[in-house]
Amino acid sequence: MRLGIFTPVTDEQTPPAELARQIEDRGFESLFVPEHSHIPTRFATPTPDGNPISRDYYRNLDPFVTLTAAAVATTRLRLGTSVLLVPQRDPIHLAKEVASLDLVSGGRAELGAGAGWLREEMRNHGTDPATRFALLTERLAAVKTIWAGPGAEFHGELVDFDPIEMWPKPVQTPHPPVWLGGWGPTTLGRVVSSGSGWLAPPGLSMDELARGIKELAELADARAVPTPLVVATLYAPTPHDLDAARELGVHRVLLGLTGAISPGNTRRGLDAYAGLLP
């Protein structure tokens, strides 16, 4: 089982290139970063955990800028998003951004994608919250189509374009790993039907994670397709938690490092997590 780091990267934290070097030097396998383009000053949408939004939500850097800086500062660190808010992004630009990161990093990019939860943020991007899940599915399908070869075209209900040329193509074949985030009644079905992996959201208990993995396997078996890989994000896990995740067959655990809005806090958090490395 692989161990990586999940953390917002802000203008108050260790700069992304130095942060990535610190993560790689300690022996972690990957760096995953979240995305929020902005936070509306006033919103009525409940937060996922019921708590006020933390400072890093307002201040995180663009994920592709962060990960490109990390790519040129490291040699083996896997670089991903957790999660990219696909309904708020143009699919053609997104295909180019991920493929460009994959090229610059020498084939180390991964795309963790989600529909998002903050409805006012979506509306500011012209996205109807009611269609965000359908939009997520179609835009990811369009991105994969663009990556697949020349003359790509896509004709869906929400995404539609005639043949285009878009380069570069990703270094990884058939394309960088794609992970779908979420924990809801339809999430796991979308994971299985899209051929993606499951990016289990932060905050799940080990029992919930086990239940999700069991349901994922049952859905895959019913459709006669391979069981998707699973990435789980855990905050302050114990060695017992990691052993349990390993027994469940989790592909990667992302060790959550949030609220670390100073270089000193970030360094101390990484040092503490380094004690969990094998």
Image: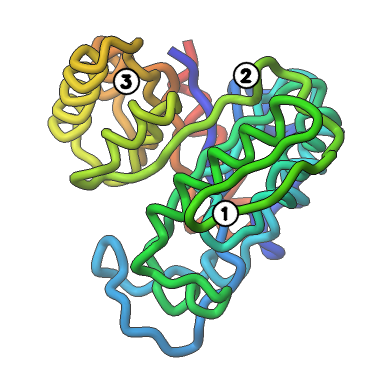
User: Helix, strand, or loop for circle 2?
Assistant: loop
Instruction: Answer above or below: position of 49 versus 77.
Output: below
How much space separates mark 3 and mark 1, taking CA atoms?
40 Å
- Disc number for residue 233: none
Residue positioned 29% across, 41% down in the render: 187
Mark 2, residue position: 27
Mark 1, residue position: 159
User: Helix, strand, or loop for circle 1?
Assistant: loop
Instruction: Answer above or below: position of 2 versus 98.
Output: above
Q: Quadrant of residue 165?
A: top right
How busy is the neighbourhood of tag 2: few (under 14 within 10 Å), some, or many (20 plus)? some
- Disc number for residue 242: 3
Residue 153 location (% of width, % of height): 69, 40
Front position in the image: 78 or 15: 78
Whether pointer 3 and pointer 1 mark residues with C-beta atoms closer than 8 Å, the reply is: no
* Amino acid bearing label 1: Val
